[in-house]
């Protein structure tokens, strides 16, 4: 409710609109709308309407405080698409209030950090005009160079790793171990240790100190610290910056009193969405930015909204749900002083009660099934490991009250179905039959098939192709990994390789495939065209006349070759984007790529330097698309979307199908056979577990205890991922565990008839069958 001293800032009409909004909000949502300063933690269940209530709260705050371009509300969220979504909602709310779309900005954490760091290059120590922003993977050249530098500096540590366990000095085995260490183990350790330490605010020197306090037989954290040190030196010498460097640079700016005051004067408050996916550095930056100028005694104006049970990024990013839980605990303890509080949004209108019952069972069962690792007893001592937090935050999803603006949907045929098909082929066939029935009854519905990995999605898409031809009225869309990691660098490299060597059959075939994928040419035998490139591109009068489809393909290829002669090389990427009919977001991604190439080839501009940079990006880095923010391509009416569980977060569908629930969910970490000479664990996961144990003020465990802790964290995330998948369903949730399935999906070739293996159901699926026997269909 607006206080008396603030109500004068809004008109009567605006007050009536705000009162109408409040009337339509649930009790937990109203806390957001009524916020007027200080700390606030909001823990919201799936489907609780947190994005809507955050947009309403933002619009009310902008109207009440008369915020403008120089005094803004800053909203921070996880992805560009989420940022675009909430930006549109705030804009719509402000329009209802008769206000222009000003007084706020919506950012990802990295775009916000980039804005702060780039405006103060002297303080941030980041001059991005002279540096290249990279997102290195474990096989990036930067990581490879880091390993090589470490090897030259620490030969004794390397020899210790080489000896490992049970080494008899045999030369062939030595060479094998050298190869595994240099190409797999050390790059993986470098990638993990650098990201974990850097995103947690630890410098190489600090990681060295931690390593000295808690040594083990390989000094794993010491190796990690040495790799981190070498990595940081290479960033400087190569003129690179990574994404964590932007946040570190922004924090350097905020540590300067004058710069901090300047930014705090421009920011009225900070609202953070998806706070469960924050790292320690991110939280520090947002607290600094939300502080009251010249009043360190006052709490910052900071709202953090999230759901610890939907934290599904901690195994491949430094995010950890524990940090948001600790923030919630901090706010709950401050309630008694009346300065801030914790609010739980437990009512949700997304799903039918049957789906909610299944999701709530997962929370309770998961905490009982996965127990934190116990202390490990050795001959010498017992390691007392502080008990990690439980997998789930006990927060029950509850139906909305009668008369709610978003009532819970009516269940479709009971709401939940549990199936046990004979094998994965029968599972897809059962999905076909169910979809046919559902869409016959409701042609405008939408549905999703959620899987763990892209290989499973490709299998389902392939198996559904015949069914789709029989039902062309139902759209079938596979949301592959390319939605996030762009295919554009690969396409640009393919086109450049072709125009520099058009006589190469391989390059000609590759460019024809790009044209075919982009639907610029009709389907044809591109292998036959590529056999004799000269004959295809410049046929003589003695050749057999080309068909219309072949002529069209030749015309486009010749246009590309003419562009090489007519345009400077630095304009070719823009031209290629236009020629391949890129959409707006793809053209923006191509421009971003061109800017990146220009920075990296400064002083050595040539088409071959461009190709060198592209080759490095394609082989060792995931170049991100610029997302247009639209989620409709996943949830369109009359469509079946095949999508991974990770990508499905934040979306929902009328009907959700989750097949392939084997006993690998939740799954154990595993040690590659070639790396077992070090022991039955991986150095990267041990380093990750040790760093996190230190950050959470737990005793640093041995490598075996750290491996157990890493397994616990990984299995917990597996269960949270399944919880997220289950809560995407509105009217019907369809689950299946097959008796026969591939042993490893990434090695399963169904086109060649690879055999299936006996498979056991996930323990969670078995528990659901016991808890809800009436839902078991076969």
Image (cartoon, rainbow, N blue to C red):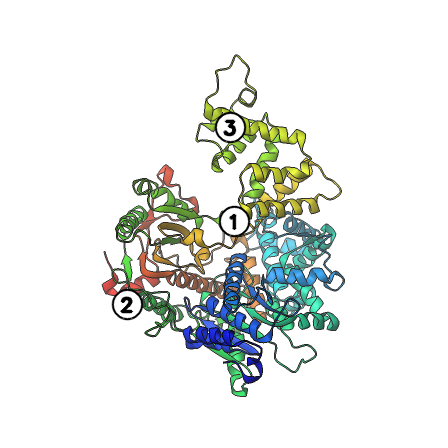
Which residue is rendered at x = 69% and y = 44% of the image? 598
In this rendering, the label closer to the viewer, 1 or 2: 2
Circle 3 Cα neighbour tier, 10 Å, few/some/many (<14 / 14–19 / ≥20): many
Residue topped by disc 1: 674
Residue topped by disc 2: 771
Q: Please provide percent x and percent y for residue 59.
A: 53, 70
Q: CA distance from mark 3 to mark 1?
A: 47 Å
Which residue is rendered at x = 53% and y = 33% of the image? 510
Residue 553's disc is 3
Residue 222's disc is none
Residue situated in front as seen by the camera: 336 or 377 = 336
Q: Please provide percent x and percent y for residue 601.
A: 71, 43
**Decide: marks 3, 2 in contact (CB < 8 A)?**
no
Q: Quadrant of residue 402?
A: bottom left
Q: CA distance from mark 1 to mark 2?
A: 42 Å
Q: Image height check: is 749 above or below 134? A: above
Q: Please provide percent x and percent y for residue 398.
A: 36, 73
Mark 1 / mark 2, whichever is N-terminal:
1
Q: Image height check: is 150 above or below 333? A: above
Circle 1 Cα neighbour tier, 10 Å, few/some/many (<14 / 14–19 / ≥20): some
Secondary element at tag 3:
helix
Q: Please provide percent x and percent y for residue 499.
A: 61, 30
Apparent side of residue 325 relative to residue 241 in the rendered image (left or right): left
In this rendering, the label closer to the viewer, 3 or 1: 3
**Decide: marks 1, 2 in contact (CB < 8 A)?**
no
Mark 3 / mark 1, whichever is N-terminal:
3
Q: CA distance from mark 3 to mark 2?
A: 59 Å
């Amino acid at each position: 409710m607006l206080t008396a001293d603030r109500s004068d800032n809004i008109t009567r009409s605006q007050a009536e609109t705000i009162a109408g909004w409040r009337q339509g909000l649930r009790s937990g949502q109203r806390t957001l709308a009524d916020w007027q300063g200080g700390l606030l933690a909001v823990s919201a269940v799936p489907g609780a309407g947190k994005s809507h209530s955050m947009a309403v709260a933002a619009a009310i705050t902008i109207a009440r405080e008369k915020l403008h371009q120089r005094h803004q509300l800053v909203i921070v969220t996880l992805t560009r698409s989420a940022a675009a979504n909430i930006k549109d909602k705030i804009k719509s709310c402000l329009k209802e209030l008769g206000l222009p779309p000003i007084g706020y900005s919506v950012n990802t954490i990295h775009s916000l950090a980039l804005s702060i760091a780039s405006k103060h290059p002297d303080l941030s120590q980041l001059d991005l005009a002279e540096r290249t922003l990279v997102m290195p993977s474990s096989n990036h050249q930067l990581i490879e160079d880091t390993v090589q530098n470490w090897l030259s500096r620490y030969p004794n540590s390397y020899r210790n790793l080489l000896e490992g366990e049970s080494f008899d000095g045999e030369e062939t085995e030595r060479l094998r171990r050298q190869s595994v260490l240099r190409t797999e183990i050390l790059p993986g350790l470098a990638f993990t240790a650098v990201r974990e330490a850097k995103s947690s605010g630890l410098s190489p020197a600090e990681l060295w100190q931690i390593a000295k306090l808690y040594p083990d037989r390989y000094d794993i954290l010491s190796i990690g610290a040495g790799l981190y040190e070498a990595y940081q030196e290479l960033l400087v010498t190569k003129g690179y910056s990574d994404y964590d460097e932007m946040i570190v640079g922004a924090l350097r700016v905020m540590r300067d009193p004058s710069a901090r005051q300047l930014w705090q004067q421009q920011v009225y408050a900070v609202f953070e969405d998806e706070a469960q996916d924050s790292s320690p550095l991110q939280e520090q930056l947002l607290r600094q930015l939300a502080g009251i100028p010249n009043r360190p005694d006052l709490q910052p104006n900071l709202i953090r909204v999230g759901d610890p049970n939907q934290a599904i990024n901690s195994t491949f990013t430094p995010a950890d749900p524990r940090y948001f839980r600790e923030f919630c605990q901090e706010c709950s303890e401050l309630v008694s002083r009346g300065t801030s509080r914790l609010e739980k949004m437990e009512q949700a209108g997304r799903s039918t009660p049957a789906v909610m019952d299944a999701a709530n069972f997962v929370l309770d069962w998961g905490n009982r099934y996965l127990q934190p690792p116990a202390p490990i007893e050795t001959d010498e001592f017992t390691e007392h490991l502080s008990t990690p937090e439980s997998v789930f935050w006990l927060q029950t999803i509850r139906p909305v009250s009668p008369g709610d603006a978003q009532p819970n949907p009516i269940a479709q045929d009971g709401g939940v179905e549990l199936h046990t098909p004979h094998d994965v082929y029968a599972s897809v066939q059962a999905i076909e039959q169910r979809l046919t029935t559902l869409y016959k009854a409701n042609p405008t519905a939408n549905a999703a098939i959620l899987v763990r990995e892209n290989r499973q999605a490709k299998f389902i898409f392939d198996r559904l192709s015949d069914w789709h031809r029989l039902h062309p009225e139902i759209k079938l869309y596979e949301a592959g990994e390319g939605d996030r990691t762009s295919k554009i660098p690969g396409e640009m490299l393919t086109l450049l390789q072709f125009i520099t060597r058009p006589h190469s059959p391989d390059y000609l075939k590759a460019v024809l495939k790009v044209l075919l994928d982009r639907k610029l040419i009709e389907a044809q035998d591109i292998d036959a065209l590529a056999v004799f490139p000269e004959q295809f591109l410049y046929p003589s009068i003695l050749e057999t006349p080309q068909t219309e489809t072949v002529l069209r393909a030749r015309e486009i290829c010749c246009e590309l070759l003419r562009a090489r002669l007519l345009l400077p090389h630095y304009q070719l990427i823009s031209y290629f984007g236009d020629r391949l009919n890129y959409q707006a977001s793809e053209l923006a991604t191509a421009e971003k790529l061109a800017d990146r190439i220009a920075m990296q080839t400064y002083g050595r501009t040539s088409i071959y330097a461009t190709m060198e940079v592209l080759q490095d990006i394609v082989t060792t880095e995931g170049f991100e698309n610029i997302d247009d923010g639209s989620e409709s391509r996943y949830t369109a009416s009359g469509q079946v979307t095949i999508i991974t569980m990770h990508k499905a977060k934040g979306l929902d569908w009328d009907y959700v199908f989750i097949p392939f629930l084997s006993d690998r969910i939740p799954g154990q970490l595993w040690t590659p056979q070639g790396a077992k000479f070090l022991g039955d664990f991986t150095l990267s996961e041990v380093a990750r577990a040790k760093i996190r144990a230190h950050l959470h003020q737990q005793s640093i465990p041995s490598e075996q205890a750290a491996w157990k802790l890493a397994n616990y964290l990984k299995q917990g995330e597996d269960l949270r991922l399944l919880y997220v998948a289950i809560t995407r369903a509105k009217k019907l949730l369809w689950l299946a565990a097959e008796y026969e399935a591939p042993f490893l999906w990434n090695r399963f070739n169904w086109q060649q008839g690879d055999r299936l293996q006996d498979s056991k159901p996930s323990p969670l699926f078995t528990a659901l069958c016991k808890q809800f026997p009436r839902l078991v269909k076969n």
